[in-house]
Amino acid sequence: MKKLFIFLSCVLAIGFVSCNDDDKEEPNYPTKNNYSNNTSNGNNNSNSGSKTTPEYFTYTGQKGDYYYVDLGLTSKTLWATTNIGAYAPGQAGDYYAWGETYYTSKKSFKWNSYKYSNGSYNTLTKYCYLSSMGYNGYTDDKTQLLTIDDAAKPYNSGGWTTPTHEQFVELANNCYWVWTNNYKSTGNSGYIVYKAKYTFDKGKLIANGETPSSSYSLYDIHIFLPDAGERNDETTDSNINAGEGVGKYWTKDLDTSTQPYFARCITFYKDFIDTDDREERCMGLPIRPVIKYSQL
C-alpha cells in the first residue's frame, strides 16, 4: 500500500501535520517528530528535554491532540502513538494515579495523597464495592472509570479514553510484539507492537535477544510502548524500573477479583506480557489512550 512521507521541521512549535479525513483508512504515514536524547529509557516526562533529535514514526490519522494507528483490530479500537504527556513514542509521558486526571499537581504517589481515599488503602471514597475497604463503610459498586475521572478525556478532544482491560487483551492477542533495546536509535527500550500480517503472527512475542521475522520493519504499521515503569515516591522525578525492562500501563477497570484498592493494568517484561496484572490505585502509571473508529 502506498505510503505518504511527510517531512516536518525540527522546530517543535510548528507542530504536526494532520492527515486528510479521506485518507484515515490508509494504514501508515511516516513523519518526523523531534525530541531530546535525554528521553532515553523513557525516564523523562513531557515537560523537559530540548526536542532536537529527529524520530520517524507511523500513524493513520489524528483526532484532537493525538495521532492514532489502526492495527486492524476487530473491535475497531485505534491506539494513540504516544502516552499522555509525551511528545514522542519513546517518552514515558506523565504518570497518573488511577482515577486522577491532573499530573502537574501531583507530588506524591502514596495513599495519603490519593484523591479517592481518606489517607489509606482501606478508607476509599469512590470506586469501592466492599464496605470493609470504604471510608466509614462507603460503597458505590463502580468498577470502571467514569468520564470525569479518565485522564484521557479532559486532556484531549472527545472520544479518547484510557483502554479497558479487554482492549489491552485484544492488543496482546492480535498483534506481533517485538522487544527492542533501542527503538529507532533513540535509546528507548520497550515493545514494538505491529499490526499482524499473518494469522500465525497474532499474539506472538519476540523476546529480548530473539530475531523477529524479516517480514516486519519499522516502516510497517505499529505502535511503540516504552518500558516506563511506575512511580510511588515523594517526587515526580523519581521512577521505579523505568528503562529497566518493565512496562506498566493503566486500564480503566477496577480489579474485582481481589480488593477494590487495586486497579487492573498490563505489565510487560523483556520476555513476557502479563495482561492480568493489578496495581495499587495510588501508584503512578503511564496511560496510552485509545479511541474507537466510530468516535472519529
Image (cartoon, rainbow, N blue to C red):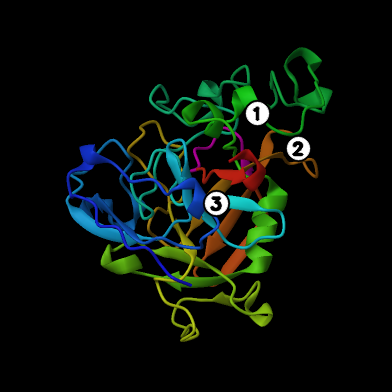
Marks 1 and 2 close (CB-CB < 8 Å): yes
* Relative vertical location of residue 166 with respect to residue 95 in this rendering, above or below: below
Quarter of the image with the C terminus is top right
Indicate left or right for 100 with 171 as reference.
left
* Closer to the camera in the image, 260 or 105: 105
* Relative vertical location of residue 203 with respect to residue 95 in this rendering, above or below: below
Q: CA distance from mark 1 to mark 2?
A: 10 Å
Instruction: Indicate which disc, 3 or 1, sits on the residue closer to the N terminus.
Output: 3
In which image quadrant can residue 257 be found? Answer: top right
Amino acid type shown at disc 1: Tyr
Q: Which residue is mark 1?
A: 121
Q: Position of residue 176 (x, y in %)?
A: 57, 72
Q: Position of residue 63 (x, y in %)?
A: 49, 40
Q: Position of residue 12 (x, y in %)?
A: 22, 42
Residue at the top extreme, as displayed: 136
In which image quadrant can residue 173 be found? Answer: bottom right
Helix, strand or loop under label 1: loop
Q: Which mark is residue 259?
A: 2
| Bounds of the magenta segment | 279-286
Q: Nearer the viewer, mark 3 or mark 2?
A: 3
